[in-house]
Amino acid sequence: MAEKQNAWDRIVNQIRSALERQKYKEAVNTFLEPLLGDQVEVFNLLEDEEQALLLEHLNVGATADLFDRLEDSETLEAAESLSIERLADVLEEMQPDEAADLLGDLPPEQASQALEEMEDIEDVLPLLKFPDETAGGRMTTAYIAVRRHTTAEMTIEFLRQVQPDDEVPYYIFVIDPRGRLVGVIGLRELVVAKPEALIEQIMDTDVIHINAQEDQEIVAQVMVRHDLSALPVVDDENRLVGVITHDDILDVLAEEATEDVYRLASVGDAELEPESPVKEHLKARLPWLYLNTLTALMAAWVISNFEDIIAQVAVLAVFQSVVAGLGGNASSQTIALFIRSIALGKLPSKGVLGILGREVMVGLIQGIAVGMIVGLGVYLWRGNIYLALVLGAAIVGNLTIASLVGTLVPLVLRSLKQDPALASPVLVTAATDSLGFLIFLSLATYFLSKLK
């Protein structure tokens, strides 16, 4: 990776030098030498002014290829430096789904002006009516569809005429006169079929498809489960409206993984980057810190009810953080396990009680195993068997509760149609901290005379 980074830095320096000398053709040629994926990395290493200057002299096709590969936020930023006329030309060369994404991100007035300048909007316009995070928002209209009574020879000749680019999936979809999806055929089956064979004779009628309104996370699950490189998208009347390809779904998987990681860390905006404005950081992170503060005060309130006990046995203050810390770690394990299963669609809708019972059993066994070790260590350290028993029992109780709550909260949030990753850590931490302190200090109160 270090070698790659050095190569990118070298290319950036060459482009920068050419731009400073106003050798724009040289800068463009240097930029276009590496593969497209490396061009993206090089482009992102350039300063904003350098990017704008390079785009000014880059041809429309190369600009469109670059925009197809950039992240949405990066494409939007780069597009701001283009004139409306040039932007329209680039949009026409882009993949329909990427062009639709960019148009949806542009300010309404700029998007409207660009659409007016575009000569061919038939492939892009249908995509603009779907939200970004749905199957319709992810699909492309670049696909091949034929009628069932077409022959194999006619279909091959049709492919020669349209010359689909490498972004078009190698599946050929079969539709009826009303545009409804009725079958699918792969290029291999088409090529080996007899020339006079009808498509309906060689097509597969069992077509896995998805509704355009379905969430992109469900799309990813379907494509991964069935190992698909392309997934047809239909409307409510089963008419074929688009196709989602494997590269689109890779973006979805990356976005969903980022979203889950951020939400597990109580960050509300999955598009937040280290270089994002301070205002966006505060908007995404501060509300959850307020909620954390509230839950922390709840735990403090529980402790405040045992002030006299702690005052009499100060050593309790030393060990109460052990109980809370272990409970927090145990609940994090459970939350991560269940949120992953929910995200991948691997958590069954039935048999939840069995899963809950198993997780509680795991928490209990872990509590006993850890509680015995901690209790033994405290006894050897402090020489008080009752303190060791109180701490060990509190750990057993808190780890059991952590497994119970860490399982229930994601399941309840899922049943309420909420993202389980969003509030799970905050809610579970509040429960384990408060209940952990309550168990530990209640046991300490009961054995108070033995702890002094």
Image (cartoon, grey):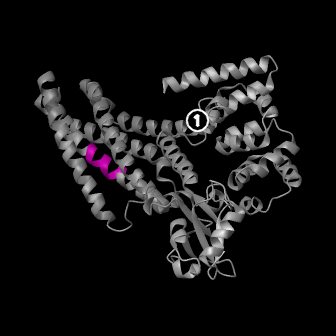
Question: Can you give x and y, in whole percent of width and height, for residue 120 in the image?
Answer: 82, 58
User: Badge 1 local density, few (<14 within 10 Å), some, or many (20+)?
Assistant: some
Could you tell me which secondary element the residue under label 1 belongs to? helix
Q: Residue furthest front?
A: 195
Camera sees residue 236? no
Question: Can you give x and y, in whole percent of width and height, for residue 194 in the image?
Answer: 54, 77
Say if the magenta span includes residue 331: no
Camera sees residue 262? yes
Residue at horizontal 51 percent and vertical 71 percent from the top: 192
Amino acid type of the residue that numbered disc 1 sits on in the rendered structure:
Leu
Question: Can you give x and y, in whole percent of width and height, for residue 441 in the image?
Answer: 27, 36
The residue singled out by tag 1 in the image is 286
- In front of the other: 436 or 30: 30
Tell me if residue 266 comes above or below residue 197 in the rendering: above
- In front of the other: 303 or 67: 67
Q: Quadrant of the C terminus?
A: top left
Q: Main secondary structure of the magenta part?
A: helix
386 relative position to 398: left or right: left
Part of the protein shown in magenta: 398-406
Q: In which quarter of the image is residue 167?
A: bottom right
Say if the magenta span includes residue 401: yes
Tell me if residue 365 comes above or below residue 229 in the rendering: above
